Image (cartoon, rainbow, N blue to C red):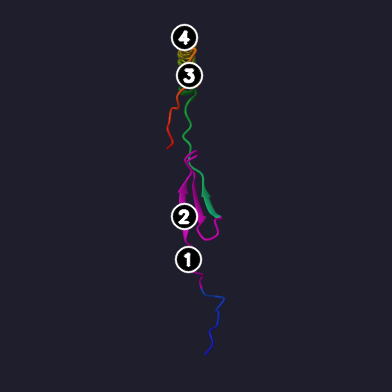
Amino acid sequence: MTETNNAESTPAPRKTVRAECPCCKSILVVDSATGVVVSHQESKKEHQSLDEFFAKQKTRSADLDAKLKAGADREKNKREILEQKFKAAQANPDLKDPPPGVIWD
C-alpha cells in the first residue's frame, strides 16, 4: 500500500501570530514558521480639527519652555555639586585617590 499526495487536498492551517504595532497601532499577522508578514491592517486614525491643533500648539510652547528651564536647573545643580567636591579636594591635599565606591571582593 502506498501513500498518495492529493494535490487538491487542503493545506494544513498556518500557525500565525497577531501583533499590534505600539507606534502606529496597525495589526500585523505573521506566519510563525517562516516569520513572513501574512497580512497588515492599518489603524484608522481620528483626525483632529484645526482648532484643536492650534490649541495644542499654544500650550506646546509653554511646555517646551518648562522642560528647558528644568534641564537648565539640573545642570546648574550639577555644577554646584562639582564645585563643592573640587573645593573639598583642594582643602585636603593628602587625599590622592578617591575611595572606591564599590568593593568587588
- Main structural element of the magenta stretch: helix, strand or loop? loop
**In what element is the residue under mark 4?**
helix
Earlier in the chain: of badge 4 and badge 2, it is: 2
**Is the residue marked by circle 1 packed among few (<14), some (14-19), or many (20+) residues within 10 Å?**
few
Q: Quadrant of the C terminus?
A: top left
**Residue nearer the viewer, 24 or 104:** 104
Q: Find disc 3 in the rendering and name its residue.
A: 60
Horizontal and vertical percent for residue 13?
Answer: 48, 66
- Report the Cα–Cα distance between label 4 and label 2: 65 Å
Asked whether 77 falls inside the magenta stretch, the response is no
Nearest-to-viewer mark from 1 and 4: 4
Q: Nearer the viewer, mark 1 or mark 2?
A: 2
Residue 54 placement (x, y as % from top left): 49, 19
Q: Which amino acid does label 3 sit on?
A: Arg
Residue holding disc 2:
17
Mark 1 to mark 3: distance in Å?
A: 50 Å
Which residue position is annotated with label 1?
13
Residue hosting label 4: 91
Whether the residues at callouts 1 and 2 have beta carbons within 8 Å, the answer is: no
Residue 81 spot, x, y in % from top left: 45, 14
Which kind of residue does numbered mark 2 sit on? Val
Judge whether 48 appears above or below 21 on screen. Answer: above
Q: Which numbered tag is attached to residue 53?
A: none
Mark 3 and mark 2 lie on one chain; the one further toward the N terminus is: 2
Sequence-first disc among 3 and 4: 3
Q: Say which element carries label 2.
A: strand
Q: What residue type is labelled 1?
A: Pro
Within-10-Å neighbours for mark 3: few <14, some 14–19, many 20+: few
Query: Closer to the camera, 74 or 57?
Result: 74
Magenta range: 10-36
Relative to 30, is 87 above or below? above
